[in-house]
C-alpha cells in the first residue's frame, strides 16, 4: 500500500520514471521499517540511505528530510482520495460521496502497517504538530475538490461545511483507532464517525 500512498495511480511510464519510482518506494519502505524498529528519533538519515543501498546525496534527490518520508506517504493517500472524488456524479449528495470515497480508500490499507506508522507519528511532537497542520491543508484541498464537482456558487458555503466535517470525522476516527490495540479495523471507526455525524444532522 505504500506505493499507492506515494504515487497514487501509476500512469504509463518510461524505464527512467519506473526506476525513479521504484527507488523512491524503496527509500520510503526502508525508512518506515527503521522508524518502526528504532523509533523516529532513533533513525538517522544516513542509516536510511545505507539500508536502502543509496548515497546520502541520492536520498536528497527524492526526499528533503526523513520527516518527509512519512508526510509524503500521507499526502499521496489524500491525493488519491481527492482524485477519486472528482469522478463522482454531481447528482450524488456531497457528504455521501465523500464518505464512500474515504471508506473505499481507508479499507484498502493494512491495519498493522497503519498502526505502526501511527505509533511513529505519535511518538514525535514535531511530527504530530505537522500532522495537525496537514489536516487544515487537506480540508482546504477537499473543499476545492468539492467545488469542482458541485459547481454552483450558491452551494459553496455548504460544501465548506462538508469538507470541515468530513476531515473532522476522519481525524476523530484515526485518533480513536490509534488508541485501541488493533481489535477493530480503522475503516470501522470511520464508518462509525460518519454514521454518528449523519444521525445528528
Image (tube, helix red, strand yellow):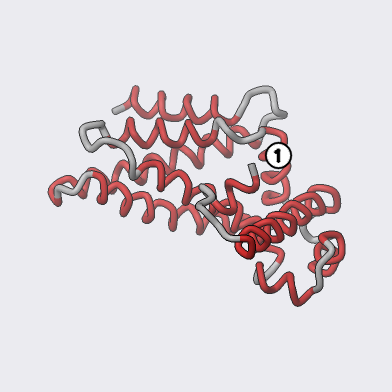
Q: Is residue 43 toward the left or the right of residue 76 in the image?
A: right
Q: Is residue 24 above or below residue 105?
A: below
Label 1: how many Cα within 10 Å (few below 14, some 14–19, many 20+): some
The spot of residue 177 in percent (x, y) is: 61, 33
Q: Name which quarter of the figure residue 196 lies in.
A: top left
All told, the count of numbered labels is 1
Q: Is residue 128 toward the left or the right of residue 58 in the image?
A: left
Q: Is residue 153 toward the left or the right of residue 171 in the image?
A: left
Q: Name which quarter of the figure residue 85 lies in.
A: top left
Q: Name which quarter of the figure residue 95 lies in.
A: top left
Q: Nearer the viewer, residue 123 or 103?
A: 103
Q: Is residue 98 above or below residue 54?
A: above
The residue that label 1 is drawn on is 113
Which residue lies at the image location 25% right of the left edge and 31% below the top edge? 92
Q: Is residue 111 above or below residue 86?
A: above
Which residue lies at the image location 25% right of the left edge and 50% below the top edge? 147
The spot of residue 51 in percent (x, y) is: 86, 60
Residue at the far front: name it.
Answer: 15
Q: Is residue 63 toward the left or the right of residue 31 in the image?
A: left
Q: Quadrant of the C terminus?
A: top left
Amino acid at each position: 500500500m505504500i506505493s499507492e500512498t506515494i504515487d497514487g495511480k501509476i500512469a504509463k511510464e518510461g524505464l527512467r520514471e519506473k526506476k525513479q519510482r521504484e527507488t523512491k518506494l524503496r527509500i520510503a519502505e526502508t525508512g518506515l521499517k527503521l522508524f518502526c524498529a528504532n523509533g523516529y528519533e532513533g533513525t538517522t538519515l544516513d542509516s536510511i540511505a545505507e539500508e536502502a543501498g543509496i548515497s546520502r546525496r541520492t536520498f536528497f534527490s527524492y526526499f528533503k528530510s526523513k520527516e518527509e518520508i512519512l508526510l509524503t506517504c500521507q499526502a499521496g493517500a489524500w491525493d488519491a482520495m481527492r482524485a477519486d472524488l472528482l469522478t463522482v456524479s454531481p447528482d450524488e449528495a456531497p457528504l455521501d460521496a465523500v464518505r464512500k470515497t474515504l471508506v473505499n480508500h481507508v479499507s484498502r490499507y493494512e491495519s498493522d502497517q497503519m498502526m505502526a506508522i501511527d505509533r511513529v507519528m505519535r511518538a514525535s511532537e514535531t511530527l504530530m504538530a505537522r500532522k495537525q497542520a496537514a489536516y487544515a491543508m487537506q480540508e482546504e484541498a477537499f473543499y476545492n475538490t468539492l467545488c469542482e464537482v458541485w459547481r454552483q456558487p450558491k452551494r459553496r458555503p455548504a460544501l465548506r461545511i462538508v469538507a470541515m466535517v468530513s476531515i473532522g470525522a476522519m481525524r476523530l476516527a484515526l485518533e480513536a483507532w490509534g488508541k485501541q490495540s488493533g481489535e477493530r479495523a480503522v475503516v470501522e471507526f470511520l464508518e462509525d464517525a460518519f454514521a454518528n455525524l449523519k444521525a445528528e444532522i
